[in-house]
Amino acid sequence: MSYDDVEIEDMEWNEELQAFTYPCPCGDLFQITKDELRMGEEIARCPSCSLYITVVYNMEDFAAGSDSTTKKGLEPSKQQPVAVA
């Protein structure tokens, strides 16, 4: 049984891992790649323990050849500097 159901929007894109991540209670991160999402995978696993989560997402957002992940804000854009007066 899955530890939790997590919306893809609640996960963070990790550029180094090239995966969406979510904090695991063990201190590591649940991980799932875009390729896994494109193949219909919905389980993000923690590499340090036996826990896993079910990722809730719209598979159409990750269809092959689709760049809608950046259009819909699933992959964070580069942060822009903000001037404070």
Image (cartoon, helix red, strand yellow):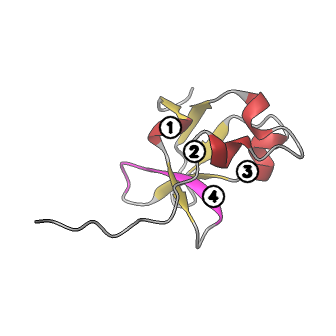
The answer to the question of whether label 2 and label 1 lie on touching residues, with beta carbons closer than 8 A, is yes
Residue carrying label 2: 74
Q: Is residue 76 left or right of residue 60?
A: left
* Camera-side residue of 65 and 51: 65
Which of the two labelled residues, at mark 1 and mark 4, occupies the earlier sequence position?
Answer: 1
Q: Amino acid at mark 3?
A: Lys
Q: Is residue 21 magenta?
A: yes
Q: Is residue 58 magenta?
A: no
Q: Is residue 13 left or right of residue 23?
A: right
Region of the chain picked out in magenta, as a range:
18-26
Alpha-carbon span between mark 3 and mark 4: 7 Å
Q: Residue furthest left?
A: 85
Residue carrying label 1: 9
The answer to the question of whether label 1 and label 4 lie on touching residues, with beta carbons closer than 8 A, is no
On residue 19, which mark appears? 4
Q: Residues within 10 Å of mark 4 (few under 14, many from 20)?
A: many
Alpha-carbon span between mark 2 and mark 4: 12 Å
